[in-house]
């Protein structure tokens, strides 16, 4: 009887132990399932925050630059004197010396360039950064060029990295990467080709899906060829371009890479807006002259 009673006692303890194990397993399953749901809802909440942030119209804000005097920048037609001095560009894997021991004063800015093929986008960017091959960063991705330019502006270095997206259908896949985190997007068209102006709306729509805070600039290229068109056709294109610029809430510039008209001035305009600089630019709506219509 003693042996039997001892067996029952052991069996009872085993049952209690089994119940505890089962309860522990159930608790762990509940905790694990709760953890999965918590991670899922956290992911959803993060997506909501990202979308709400991307959808806002808050622009990029940077500190005011110091008023330290610098040397002037020259070399562009119709360019007023100012205190913006170009410096040697430093690219990944090499480049020149900037004269600084650290990057504490370096502000890196990303700018995207969008538009159809054969409208002069790459020529425009090369005219600005210079034709030094060291300033062009090679990528394995088709339809995308990166070019760098560093400026010395009132005691600080401004490093532009310009993302030049090709204009063919294969380049549309590069738009999200090129536009994300850009402080300004240049929408370009050929002043002698109205179909490229009409295409700007498509580029603008795609770009705004990925970046709604960047400063939009509408740029007409090949102004030197544009002035050879009949006056009535010039007027029609000017009216249409200004209407598109108003719809995009963008500033409008007519430019020429061949004659260096309004090339560096556009980048100065962008930098002045970003850093609240006192440098200003006059509007120019005179027929036969390069249009400048900024907001």
Image (cartoon, helix red, strand yellow):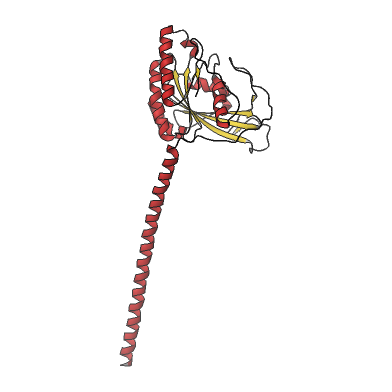
Q: Is residue 281 above or below residue 212?
A: above
Q: Position of residue 173 (x, y in %)?
A: 40, 32
Quarter where residue 80 is shown: top right
The quarter of the image holding the N terminus is bottom left
Q: Is residue 236 above or below residue 161?
A: above
Number of marks in the rendered image: 0
Looking at the image, can residue 4 be seen?
yes
Q: Residue at x 44, y 19 (%)?
A: 242
Q: Position of residue 145 (x, y in %)?
A: 49, 28
Q: Position of residue 101 (x, y in %)?
A: 68, 37
The residue closer to the viewer here, 295 or 30, is 295
Q: Residue at x 57, y 34 (%)?
A: 108
Quarter where residue 9 is shown: bottom left
Taking 3 as reference, is 250 left or right? right
The residue closer to the viewer here, 283 or 258, is 283
Q: Position of residue 117 (x, y in %)?
A: 42, 21
Q: Is residue 30 above or below residue 176?
A: below
Taking 287 as reference, is 100 left or right? right
Looking at the image, can residue 92 be seen?
no
């Amino acid at each position: 009887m003693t042996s039997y009673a001892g067996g029952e006692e052991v069996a009872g303890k085993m049952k209690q132990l089994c119940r505890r194990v089962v309860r522990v397993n159930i608790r762990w399953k509940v905790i694990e399932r709760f953890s999965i749901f918590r991670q899922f809802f956290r992911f959803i909440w993060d997506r909501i925050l990202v979308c709400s942030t991307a959808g806002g119209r808050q622009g990029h804000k940077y500190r005011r630059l110091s008023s330290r005097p610098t040397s002037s920048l020259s070399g562009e037609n119709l360019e007023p004197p100012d205190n913006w001095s170009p410096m040697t560009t430093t690219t990944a894997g090499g480049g020149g010396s900037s004269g600084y021991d650290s990057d504490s004063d370096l502000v890196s800015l990303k700018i995207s360039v969008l538009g159809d093929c054969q409208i002069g986008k790459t020529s425009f960017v090369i005219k600005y950064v210079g034709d030094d091959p060291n300033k062009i960063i090679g990528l394995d991705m088709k339809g995308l060029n990166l070019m760098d330019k560093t400026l010395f502006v009132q005691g600080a270095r401004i490093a532009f990295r310009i993302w030049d997206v090709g204009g063919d259908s294969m380049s549309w896949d590069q738009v999200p990467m090129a536009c994300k985190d850009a402080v300004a997007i240049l929408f370009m068209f050929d002043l002698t080709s109205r179909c490229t102006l009409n295409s700007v709306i498509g580029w603008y729509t795609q770009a705004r899906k990925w970046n709604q805070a960047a400063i939009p600039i509408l740029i007409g290229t090949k102004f030197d060829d544009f002035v050879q068109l009949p006056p009535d056709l010039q007027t029609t294109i000017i009216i249409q371009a200004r209407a598109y610029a108003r719809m995009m809430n963008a500033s409008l510039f007519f430019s020429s890479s061949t004659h260096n008209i309004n090339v560096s001035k556009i980048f100065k305009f962008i930098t002045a807006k970003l850093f609240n600089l006192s440098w200003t630019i006059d509007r120019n709506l005179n027929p036969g002259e390069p249009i400048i219509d900024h907001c």
